[in-house]
Amino acid sequence: MDMRLTPTGSFRWKMNDTLLRDQEIIQKAQKTLKDYFEINLNTTVEKRVIWDASKAVMRGFLIQQNTIKKRAQNEKKDKILEKIKECEKKLRSKPKSQEILREIKLYQAQYSKLINQEVEWKIKLMKQRTFESANKCGKLLAWQLKKRQKLNTVTNLEIEGRNIQNPVEIRKCFQRYFKQLYMQGPQKETEIDQFLRRNGLPKLSQENRTILNYKITQQEIEGAIQNMQLGKSPGPDGLTSKYYKTLKDYLTQPLMEVCNEIMEGKKAPESWKEAFITLIPKSETENTQLKNYRPIYLLNVDYKIFANILANRFKRVLNEVIHKDQAGFLPGRHLFDNTRNIIDILELLQTNINTKAVLIFIDAEKAFDNISWKFMKKNLEGMGVGRGFENGIDAIYSEQFTQERGGFALPDLRLYYESAAFCWLKDWLLLENTDVLDLEGFNNAFGWHAYLWYDKVIVHKAFKNHIVRKAILNVWIKYKDLLENKTPRWLSPMEAKARKRLSMEAKWPKYWEILEKVGDTWRLQSFEKLKDKVRDWLHYAQIREVFNLDKKTGFQVEKSKLETELLEPKTKVLSKMYNLLLKWNTQDETVKSAMIKWAQDIGYNIMFADWERLWTTGVRFTACNALKENIMKMIYRWYMTPVKLAKIYHLPDNKCWKCKGTEGTFFHLWWTCPRVKAFWEMIYNELKKVFKYTFPKKPEAFLLGMVGQRVLKKD
């Protein structure tokens, strides 16, 4: 790797994202790109060169527009300053001239007005961001909560007992350190080949190889651009993700052509070979030590788009080749799998107190930085990823130079936890991940399906003594009838009838594998057909006994929601299950409990059309999350009242905090309390003066904003 440290004082251009908020500039940028690609794409020049040149053209265009904008902003100030200087010269020759003094003060007032306008605009933008974000869990809150650290400028380093403060020497120390860190030692290809022959990953199927190597499409480019986050620092070309998002209609096609040429074996754009390294000090460490700085690589956005496309393709096939012990970072795998393993081990050790054990956690230091790319390349070749995908990987890692609901996204936590429980329950249903199942079910008296479908937990009460099993089983019992109203296809009567032991079969036949349809009825296959799957006649007789009971319920012919939403998908299982549970928990709640309570309090029913209008438009009239939050709190009667607190904490006093004479119910606190009534009367009278219109004073209008059509448009 060649280290290119940016010389001190060198300029790093970064696109001004605010330029692309101006529609006039956007239209000019679109025309510039359109004209450029129409002229150059049909020539004999390499696509990668045309692409890099387009970025240079657009950098020049954006610099020009930024300059024009700044010049227009500064022109007035410069003219006023020039006049002030002229007046000051005149004042030196005529120091007692009151007319010149008045003229200077006039120009100074004009200059101050321009400066104040700029400051006011910036304050207005800052207030707008604060108003819209409020206490929303977003970037603004993250910035406010972020630990304020000193500037990341390195002023001194401790190297072999010496204190180095010279900036040039400090830069050289970092250069030597990272060059040595990333330097690949001598690697013998024969040793790599021998290791891979013994321990290499299995070859990919033709179907998976096709997934990795088909031509990159516009949809993939657009999807990668759409997933790019705004506000991230750009790479050496200075173009941010805002540039690609705003102008994607004109950039997608040429970028797709460049990416496909790379997959065919042609060279990548030269700009993809550069990156900035930004050094971030690790928290709570000594900042004078080289090893306590974490390098962050700032890469060009177009490079990241291509890399994301390859990564998304690779994720689709990795599940088949990466061992199941690898938790997280792959579709269908989660980091909480490791947490579950730890809990299971601790539960097992609590039962077997004489067993000596130790849990060891190992972390590879700078694993990504120290990886052997030659080994990785050989490994990919051995897997048979295909020539096109190999070309894409080569383009990414070779010749790299480094330089320095209702508008609320708040989930229902109860449903979220239940969805997470179903992700764990997946192993119980499919009888997969046997290593973990053996740990969790080491003291089970029956097979897992006996507890899930045949209620053996009534017989074996100790099943619920396990902290994980109890929680997951309770969730399953709650939704069992909704998920499976007939005997499910995935149920294994053989596993359910088996006595639990650690040497049990790894795979158990499911009902859909041992049943056959004769006419309109289902029947169990003969012993001859199942003799490879059952142990003996007694075992077969037990299965037939279970089958005769299950057929009274009937068998699931088509795939159930449980299979399609949880068991089959490998990705986004948590979100799919959450959406399904959310649908079930709200589909029958056309009239919500809060709506009934509001009707009881005000003494009459609110029309359902008014509620519909409130849900669809009433909570979306503002961009301010704080106002939206207040509306939702009022609709759902979120606030704690004296009556509610007295019930929770068994308090003797449940009177209103304001009037001290009546029960402090929700409606009393907000509407019928005499002191609150006076407040609303004042608001009502002021509104009549403003609108010059008399309208009914109803609680739903003031508390819920249900104005409806009662106030005519002409008024």
Image (cartoon, helix red, strand yellow):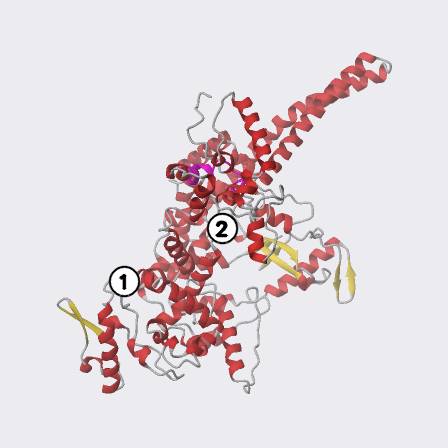
Residue at the farthest front position: 661
Q: In the rendering, at what x and y percent does residue 24 appear?
A: 49, 29
Residue sticking out furthest to the right: 96
- Is residue 311 one of those drawn in magenta? no
Can residue 500 be seen? yes
The vertical placement of 505 against 22, above or below, is below
Q: Quadrant of the N terminus?
A: bottom right
What's the mark number on residue 559?
Answer: 1
User: Which residue corresponds to the image point at 37% horizontal and 56% vertical from the top-left?
Assistant: 580
Residue 515: image location, x then y, percent: 21, 73
Q: Position of residue 286 (x, y in %)?
A: 72, 62
Determine whether, in the image, residue 450 is placed left or right of residue 527: right
Q: Amino acid at mark 2?
A: Leu
Task: Determine the residue positioned at 56% across, 50% down.
Answer: 643
Mark 1 crowdedness (10 Å alpha carbons): few <14, some 14-19, many ≥20? few
Residue 233 seen:
no
**Element marked by disc 1:** loop
Q: CA distance from mark 2 to mark 1?
A: 31 Å
Range of magenta residues: 613-628
Label 2 neighbourhood size at 10 Å, few (<14), some (14-19), many (20+)? few
Q: Residue at the left extreme?
A: 519
Taken as a whole, is the magenta stretch helix, strand or loop?
Answer: helix
Dot 2: what SS? loop
Q: Earlier in the sequence, mark 2 or mark 1?
A: 2
Q: Report if residue 625 lies within the magenta region.
A: yes
Name the one closer to the observer, 239 or 434: 434
Residue at numbered disc 2:
410
Given residues 674 and 512, the one toward you in this image is: 674
Q: Quadrant of residue 420?
A: bottom left
| In the displayed structure image, the side of residue 478 where residue 694 appears, left or right | right
Query: 349 above or below 125?
Result: below
Q: Percent from the top left, x then y, of residue 271?
A: 52, 49
